Amino acid sequence: MRLSTWIRQHLAALRALLVLTAITGIVYPLAVFAVAQLPALREKADGSLVDANGTTVGSSLVGQSFADADGAALVRYFQSRPSAAGDGYEPMSTAASNLGPEDIVDTPARPSLLTTVCTRSKEVGDREGVDGSRPYCTKDGVGAVLSVIGPREADGDVTHPVQVVSVNEACPAQPFLGTYRGVRVECAEAGRDYSVGRIVPIRGDAPADPVVPADAVTASGSGLDPHISPEYATIQVSRVAKARGVTEEQVRALVDEHTRGRTLGFLGEPRVDVLRLNLDLDRRYPYRG
């Protein structure tokens, strides 16, 4: 190849590089930024930030915790749904727990999803003064699950167990059930593996439709959901009203103001904006405690 041809080819490549760099690295980003600053788009492009008294306090797209330094719920505020994103509502760690309905046995590394749900439901019930019981949960807030050990039938059932262990209740806990098929239920010994038995969840006598709704005990897929269901907001009204020294009717009216219906009338579910609701509470009914 002649030197002049080699030079022309490389100069053409350099010109293409400079042109594409200018278009994709400068012109296009500036054009997108300019469009994003249009009045109808600017708020969303800037992160849908929420201000209070001149200070940015959050985003309408990202949930946040309303708890003290020890993680205890602040009684004067409506509580958000749980989060599995990092230590809670971390936008850079958005994630779900990836645990499913078959995760019902606790391990030394972590509690099962069932026990996590049971524990949260009991905590919410105790805090709000409502029935926090759920199917397949013990009264102490762990998964009501047995390992039934003994000869198995063709269908996998153990009709004549020789040992029954409440796998999520470590000794010296008193098992939630006295006997199962005539065999005394034992507490679980630390470090023992009971997977040899048939794992049997026990439904119990809790109502099929729990008072504590699902969004109060399960995290969203992103871990950043800024909304709660109207049902979860409703069971918090009494606590918030008492803490702020106002009537339940006043607080309930605020909840109604911050409740939105299904998008376009059929997408999603009705929802309550927790951050804006709590900000409105502080503005109208300041906490005096």
Image (tube, rainbow, N blue to C red):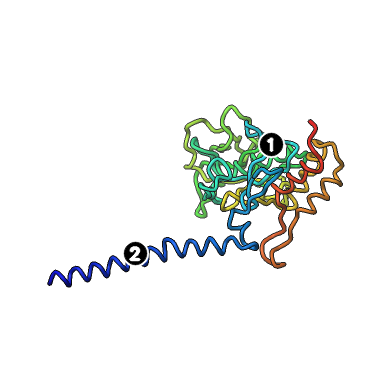
- Label 2, on which residue? 18
Q: Decide: is 225 above or below 180.
A: below
State which quadrant residue 117 falls in: top right
Mark 1 lies on a secondary structure that is loop
* Residue 234 position within the rendered picture, expressed as x and y whole percent measured from the top left: 78, 48
Residue at x 61%, y 59% (from the top left corner): 42
Mark 2 lies on a secondary structure that is helix
The nearer-to-camera label among 2 and 1 is 2
State which quadrant residue 89 falls in: top right
* Residue 221 position within the rendered picture, expressed as x and y whole percent measured from the top left: 57, 53
- Label 1, on which residue? 73
Q: Which one is in front, 30 or 171?
A: 30
Seen in the image, is 136 located left or right of residue 248? left
State which quadrant residue 267 falls in: bottom right
Q: At label 2, which amino acid type do we have?
A: Leu
Q: Which one is in front, 220 or 200?
A: 220
Q: Decide: is 42 above or below 81.
A: below
Q: Do the residues labelled 2 and 1 touch (CB within 8 Å)?
A: no
Q: Which one is in front, 89 or 50?
A: 50
